[in-house]
Every structure is written in C-alpha cells, then in structure tokens.
Amino acid sequence: MKAVQFGAGNIGRGFVGLLLHEGGYEVVFSDVADALVDAINAVDAYTVHEVGPGGVDRTVTGFRAVNSKTDPDAAADEVATADVVTCAVGPTVLRFIAPTIVAGLTRRSPDAAPLVIMACENAIGATDLLRAEIESAAGADARELLAKAVFANTAVDRIVPAQPEGAGVDVTVEPYFEWTIEQGPFGGSLPNIPGAHFVDDLAPYIERKLFTVNTGHAATAYFGARAGIDRISDALADPQIAAAVGAALEETSAVLAATHGLDPADLAEYRATILERFRNPALVDTVQRVGRQPLRKISRHERFIGPAAAAAEHGLSTDALVAAIAATLEFENADDTQAVELRQLLGALDAQTFTTRTTGLEPQHPLFAAVEAVVAARQDALRAA
C-alpha cells in the first residue's frame, strides 16, 4: 500500500505520515521545499518524539520524498499509483496541489481502486474545498476524474510546536492526538489508519476541535502576547490569562451544546484536557508562532468569529470571545505578513469597513456592534500612541 502526503512539514511527518506508516503504508512526501525534500531522502528513518506524560519515541521508516515544484510529473506518477492521498499544507494552498492530483488521476489505471483523498487541515470541510479545487483544475474531464476518487472530510488534532535547532527531519510532538474521519464515503471499506476514529457525522467533532483547541490555542497566544509572555505554557500559568481563555472556551462549549446537542459535562472535561495539553512545559511553543496569520483567525468561519457569531445568533454570551478578538487586534509580529497587514488595515479603514472586510460579518448581524466597538477601541489606542 502507498500513501502520498502533500506537505512534508512537522504535521505531515509527525502526525499524518506517522499514522499512515503505522497503518502499513509506504509514505511518499510531496513538498516544494528543496532542502526539506533532500533531507528526507538522505535518511532511512526518522523519529517522532512524544514529549509529556505517556510520551514515547516512534520510528518511521519506508518513506521517500518528491519535489512537486521541480518535478511535478514525478509527484503525479506517485498519485497515480497511490491508495491514499492526504495533505497538511494549509487551506490556502489546496489550489496549488490540485493540479498535481488531477494529473495523477488522469494517469490512474481504470482498473485501480478509487483513490482515497483526505485533507488534514485546520478548516471545516477542507476535503470538500480540495475536491472543488480538483474539479476546477480538471475542467471538462472533472466528472470522469472525480469518479476515480473517494473524498472524506476529517478533523485532526495534535500540537506540533516549533522544532529545536538541529533536529533534522525528526519531529517533536505531544502524545495526544485525534484523527476523526467521516465514514460514509467509504461504503464500509475503511482505510487502515491505526488510531483514527470513523464517524457518521463529522460536523460536531470538527467544530468541537476547531472551537476548543484552535480557539483556545489562539486566545492563549494573543492574551500572552499582550502580556509580553513568550511561551504558551507560561501564558496559561498566568491566572488572569487562564481565566480569560477558560471563559472564551466556556462560550464556545455553550455554542456546541446548542448547535450539536453535545453534553455540557463532556465538553467541560474536553476543555480541561485541552487546557492541560497547552500547559505541557515540554512543548516549547511560543505565542508568536501560534499567533501567526491573525487575519485568517478572525475571518468569518474561523476560531473566533465562527463560534461568537453562532453564540450571538442563539442569544448566548459572547463577551469572552470578543475580548479574545480584541487581543488579536493587538498582535504584532514584523515577520508575519498578516500581522503587518492587520496593523495597516487598522490604520487605513474606518471601524465599520474594517469589521466588514476582515470578519465577513454584515452590519445587521447581532455580533457586529460588539466587534466594531473593539476595532474602534484599538484604532483609538493606535492613534493615541
């Protein structure tokens, strides 16, 4: 069996690639980073170091890498003969890998079993997004090529921090992980992925993850950055930050209970587990890394506006989530293009235009006024500085 994993970064190697290896797949990493591809091909094995309670070292073998930038034909050939294609490249990059998948499907034998395609991204319905990009890239051949594949949405969860200097292709991760996959598209013939959880309805799981793990992680980063704290674990050691993050997650849990009927007691236990993971001192993770791409994180269906908008629509509290949005607006990182753009937009647009453009909220939405108010407050503070 063979799996092609687009994205050979830390998530690709330390989470998706590891589980595919443990499922018996030969793993072919496809990436555009020349040095990373060369480094992977220079070794016969790499180690995934799990740090924290219960963590062990796991060795990955039986892999190689192709450079889809310099040799797209080689990447397409790998897709053509694969059993599974996965990706961890970021939602905005899906359109760039779609043509390679199309080329692979074009070359695929008509006698081959359908290619399993799963996008492992921090986005709701990421595989649906990838499927749409493949359909667009395929043009007139879309119907024929899509029939050669099975598309399943997934929810993935594992903290993979910035890696230590000199680690090579080894990866340090936390012991905890979740990979939840919708099982309906497979018709009962599930791929072999040890530890994966197959469910009938993915929506509650992916929103629970996005609106708890991702919301909590980002809120910790932005509150921590505001306080001048460097590490995520140190930020949660601050009682005020811990309380602010906890309050935001209580609001997202209320939304999850209201929209999906999830049990509040189970959600409380889940929140506690998530916060304990963030406190893991062995994960040397920084607020600057986690806080990257703030504009994406305040967009309409992301980790702050998504649950806050739903809460407002249900008449639930949004104060703590709006406070996290306010902290996001204060995030500065000269090395992050979105953080730089955020600051520029705050200076160039009025509060209403900024709120509409960056959050996707309409002025008549019940959340709009509260978000517009924190935008205006941030702009006032910048003008006074």
Image (cartoon, rainbow, N blue to C red):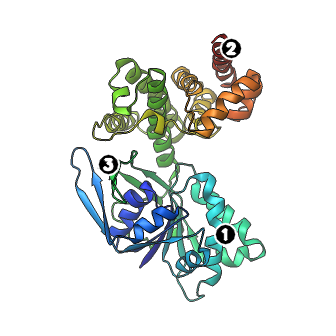
For the C terminus, the quadrant is: top right
The residue singled out by tag 1 in the image is 99
Specify whether 180 is left or right of 297: left
Real-space Cα distance between discs 3 and 1? 34 Å
Q: Classify 10 Å Cα crowding around label 2: few (below 14), some (14-19), many (20 and above).
A: few
**Quick check: 373 above or below 225?**
above
The answer to which of marks 3 and 1 sits earlier in the sequence is 1
The residue singled out by tag 2 in the image is 383
Q: Classify 10 Å Cα crowding around label 3: few (below 14), some (14-19), many (20 and above).
A: some
Q: Mark on residue 176? A: 3
Nearest to the observer: residue 373 or residue 28: 28
Identify the secondary structure beneath mark 1. helix
Q: Position of residue 288 (x, y in %)?
A: 47, 34
Specify whether 265 is left or right of 104: left
Residue sitting at x 56%, y 23%: 318
Answer with the quarter of the image where residue 105 lies: bottom right
**Quick check: 223 above or below 78?**
above
Answer with the quarter of the image where residue 60 lies: bottom left
